[in-house]
Amino acid sequence: MINSLRGFRDLLPPESDLFTRIEAAAREVFGLYGYQELRIPALEKKELFVKSTGDTTDIVEKEMYAFTDGGGREVAMRPEGTPGVVRAYIEHNLGQTGRNGKYFYIGGMYRAERPQAGRYREFTQIGAEHIGNPSPAADAESISMLVRLLEKAGVEGCSVELNSLGCGECRKTYREILLAFLRARAEKLCEPCRGRIERNPLRALDCKIDGPWLSAEAPKLTLCPACAEHFDTTQKYLGTAGVAYKVNTSLVRGLDYYTRTVFEVRTTALGSQDAVAAGGRYDDLVKSMGGPQAPAIGWAMGVDRVAMLLKDKPAPDTAPKTFIVAASKEAGEKAFALLTALRSAGVSSDFSSFDLSLKSQMRSADKSGASFALIIGEDELKAGTCAIKSLKTRGDQQTVPLSDAPSTLKQLLKG
Ligand code: ATP
Ligand code: MG
């Protein structure tokens, strides 16, 4: 037999139900905040990610599924959603034609990392991007929307960590200071960091190996007055929205395009894969990708990790409410009409095979988790009725005309 690839998995019920619930909660919350859905391709030109996510990031340097397709094009499976959203924003001139620059996406992302619990090669992200608004209120709105979404989905015990990386100007000065610091410690750095500090010294602070001690010892970034004010006001608005957060000056994030606000939502419940969602402001990305000057803020949430957090919570019952059983081919025809009528009336219903014995069909009815079995035997067929048998309280049974079955069931299920 052929198995699935490592790091790629089948989502089976009831886990798949969890994904559906999280996505439904997200859609509801996005509606409250005026976001519209964008469905972007899973495969893009490789160049898109190299230019936006950044060629010195782990995502692009080590984790990307990039290949040359049959037509000789350099392509890549999307490792994250923001580059595709920004490309679509520019390509379709959404700054002019769109409603408010607020977009969300839901979909699979692909990264060739070492699979472990909470870390897969194909995983689902729900992401939100707000393009065209430079205000700190947009930062606070985006973060508070994420917190609301997690609450709505039923996640507890998360904390928000917040930092500001400043603008290009703040970073220019800091780059030199940090580079001098890193050069003096080059022999202590891991191989990849040594290779990339000259090209992107900030990257070292996010390194999984050297990041922790470097963040503790390295000189800290000083924000310019405008960036300091933006950061202050963002925090004021977060306070107004009732969002609890902690400033963490070591938070740098593993993507290149961030400016000013960055944040991460963490949990203590998932061990080392503790990041549930992350994001930040990217004021220069749209322009650098060939679009208009359009400051933006966004985030992405890992649905697989959120699902892990919800695993032990009671799941809503998705079993069909009724199960139809028929004694013969002729009864089967009536039964099929009944199935249709029940579903039209909004009563969920299922069946196995009307060609099987009554006993075997009743076994399937029990296994289905349905509350009621509707049985059309020979007597019922003659009388134009069906027997309704409770599968939860043994022995309860009544017979009703077939045409009354949907309304009777609706009543019974209410009680
Ligand atoms: P990590 O530090 O855990 O590798 P990241 O910084 O690479 O996370 P982002 O690129 O910011 O993650 O993606 C946002 C969210 O997507 C993460 O917070 C996480 O919940 C989820 N995520 C990222 N990579 C994976 C993965 N390989 N498998 C499952 N979820 C993931
Ligand atoms: Mg990662």
Image (cartoon, rainbow, N blue to C red):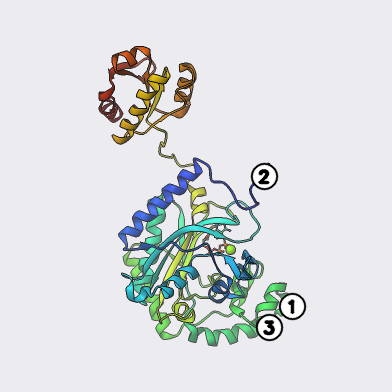
Indicate the amino acid at tag 2: Ile
Q: Residues within 10 Å of mark 3 (few under 14, many from 20)?
A: some
**For numbered disc 3, what is the local secondary structure?**
helix
Q: Earlier in the sequence, mark 2 or mark 1?
A: 2
Query: Which residue corresponds to mark 1?
Result: 187
Is the C terminus in the top left, top right, bottom left or bottom right quadrant?
top left
Measuring from the top left, give residue 37's x and y in whole percent: 38, 61
Q: Is residue 263 visible?
A: no
Quadrant assignment for the N terminus: top right
Task: Give residue 180's position: percent from left, percent from top.
Answer: 64, 86
Q: Which residue is mark 3?
A: 183
Query: How far apart are the two marked residues, 3 and 2, measured between alpha carbons?
Result: 50 Å
Nearer to us: label 2 or label 1: 2
Q: Residue furthest top?
A: 379
The answer for how far apart the CA atoms under marks 2 and 1 are is 46 Å
336 w.r.t. 225: above or below: above
Q: Which residue is mark 2?
A: 2
Q: Earlier in the sequence, mark 3 or mark 2?
A: 2
Q: Secondary structure at mark 2?
A: loop
Q: Is residue 400 left or right of residue 8?
A: left
**Whether label 3 touches label 1, CB < 8 Å:** no
Q: Nearer the viewer, residue 97 or 101?
A: 97
Q: CA distance from mark 3 to mark 1?
A: 8 Å
Name the residue located 30 percent from the left edge and 18 percent from the top edge. 385
Q: Callout 2: few (<14), some (14-19), or many (20+) C-alpha neighbours within 10 Å?
A: few
User: Residue 402's quadrant in the figure?
Assistant: top left
